[in-house]
Amino acid sequence: MLFKDQLYFVRENMKKNKMRIFMTVLATAMGTAFLIVLASVAFGLHDTLIKDVLEQETVNQVQIYGKDDPNSQGITDKDIDYFQSLEHVRAVRKQSYLRQSPLVSLNGYETSPHTVAVDMGALETGGTPLEDGRYATSSDEVVVGYHFYEQLLEKDTDPEDMYDENGERTEDTLYQGELIGETIDLTVSRLIDETDTEEKTYQLTIVGVTAEPANEWQQDQSLYTTFDFYQSISEYTGTPGGEMYFQEEPMDLTFYYDEVTIQSNNLENVQALTDTINDQGYYGYSVASELKQINMLFTIAKAGLIFIGAIAVIIASIGIFNTMTMAVTERAPDIGIMKAIGASPKTIKQIFLLESSIIGIMGATIGTLVSYLISFLVNIGLPMILEATFEDQLPEGFQFSSIPWTLVLIAYVICLLVTLISGSRPAKKATKIDVLSALRREL
Amino acid sequence: MIEVKQLSHQFELGKKDKKTVIPVLQDVSFSVTKGEIVTLVGRSGSGKSTLLHLIGGFLPRQSGAITINGTDVSDFTEAQFAEFRLGTIGFIFQNFQLIQSMTAYQNVELPLILQGVSETARKIQALETLEKVGLKGFEHHYPSELSGGQQQRVSVARALVLNPLIILADEPTGSLDSETEEDLLHLIKELNESLDITFLIITHDEEVAKIGHRSLMMHDGALIDQEVK
């Protein structure tokens, strides 16, 4: 029997019981829609989170926090050379923090910034763009963070006048002058004995301001200097990184990097790079590892929700089983006639399985369309409701529900499997119909 | 064409512990040659219908052997018999056994569909066969819109459409009036002569028995006599 003819048979049979078929398809559609909409929440939140993580500049980076070696005090130039020799490395950004907060004066304003010595070349290639100016090229030049100016306080200002009732800086107390090209006085201290200190002031020129960080909550108030300048402070204080510590004997001033960030050339390679570095005994961390965990967590959540959704489809399958069983009972005389003429049990089974599959496919298709509509409405309506109810704005690009094609495929497969299973018993029953009993209308 | 050897059959009635065994066929042997019309006559309960159902593969054989057109069908499974039946045996039933939701044309087309014949070819064949049985113009009528005689003609057309070698008929005139019965018998005779189709007809009607080249008489599950005309 040709497939086209089987379809024709099924269509004719379905026409005879339109209402019953409609109700069964409706139940299947509701089950499928429930499955898709439920799982789409996990897909939506996952997408939002991944998008958020990927938007961070750090996503391509592997951060090195140290080395698993009892004799090692930190990351040295030798380690940096090793990192640079690795495949897929675009740049190695290293930095060392000044172990004291120097006093910085600029046109009557003062602050004690977090001072970081960085490799200016790596800063450029390592994804820290500048808002204005250029990177420092000599030891008497510095780059300041985007929010550096917010920390500058006018001398002798009462701190109470600097903040408004909401705790934010008042506009008129902020530094309004230029930054690029201005000279700052940076004063560092050192201990000359157990208790006494002395100071030294360096004059440095601001040549650049870093760009605004990608996330609103990030603040960049640092002062970026060169390693040469950092080394000169170490030499002045006689301690590594200008630490306020006194010791009679001269101290080892070997350069150790506090933080090393390796920039990968591709997001795909970050995990492999992290694994390689960790295998060599370094403590490496990348957002990609976090992504792996996020993905794992959401995969479990998605599987759980799909499982719960599948229960709804299974419940709907009871309807299919019922519909198909009734169809077999009602059509028993016709099945008997067909078998008497020469229809094989296989053909009879195929016709009934095809009918239940069509019910499943129709239900899955309607359910999918309804799911897309619900998902669309939820993504539009939910932020509006939340904003109206809680007066709180959701992050930009927030997606509550997302239906990728894979979810639709999963729903179709589940729906089809469940309908085939629920239709298989009635189909088998149809093949077992006794021709003589059917012809005598005894069934 | 049909060869039946030592065929016996019994029905078991009742539940396991209270089973009653009723023998219906006892050691029946006979053969039908190609192009013959053979009638099986006997009273109700003589076993003639059971014999026909065993030859048609509607009942599983218990003992004895059945050979049709040189093929031993004794141990055929249900599926094998279905496939064999489709091209070899046509059936005519007492109460027509037409699918009520299908038109005369669709009922005749059904065996062709089951055999996987293309739509164009089966249209030609079905219409030709309906014309052959004198139902041209009634193609789109449903069984309920046709008389008993016309319905039986549709049934004959359905049995005929795949050009079978054998037609098994179970009381074909049982539901017809005498005038229509005569028409149908005339049609059977005509088909036998023009298409050389073998007919095995069950009947208790003497008029029907007359059209056979041979009549086999059954009584209490056994063949008791044979009449050659």
Image: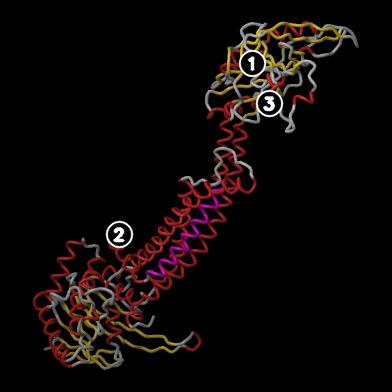
Q: Which residue does the numbered mark 3 point to in the structure image?
A: A283
User: What residue span does the magenta drawing correspond to?
Assistant: A18-42
Residue A412 visible in this rendered orientation of the protein: no
Residue B201 visible in this rendered orientation of the protein: yes
A33 in magenta: yes
Amino acid type, residue under disc 1 in the picture:
Ile
Out of A324 and B229, give the one closest to the viewer: A324
* Mark 1, other Cα within 10 Å: few <14 / some 14–19 / many ≥20: some
Distance between the alpha carbons at the discs numbered 1 and 2: 68 Å
Q: Marks 1 and 2: same chain?
A: yes
Q: Which mark is residue A3?
A: 2
Q: Are marks 3 and 2 in contact (CB under 8 Å)?
A: no
Q: Position of residue A334 (x, y in %)?
A: 32, 75
Distance between the alpha carbons at the discs numbered 3 and 1: 14 Å
Q: Which mark is residue A80?
A: 1
Please name the residue shown 48% across and 45% down the image.
A404
Please name the residue shown 13% across and 75% down the image.
B137
Amino acid type, residue under disc 3 in the picture:
Tyr
* Mark 2, other Cα within 10 Å: few <14 / some 14–19 / many ≥20: few
> Looking at the magenta stretch, what is its main secondary structure?
helix
Instruction: Tell me the quadrant of the picture where the C terminus of chain A can be found.
Output: bottom left
Distance between the alpha carbons at the discs numbered 3 and 2: 63 Å
> Which chain is disc 2 placed on?
A
Q: Find residue A138 and report its image quarter.
A: top right
Q: Earlier in the sequence, mark 1 or mark 2?
A: 2
> Does residue A80 lie above or below B87 as drawn?
above
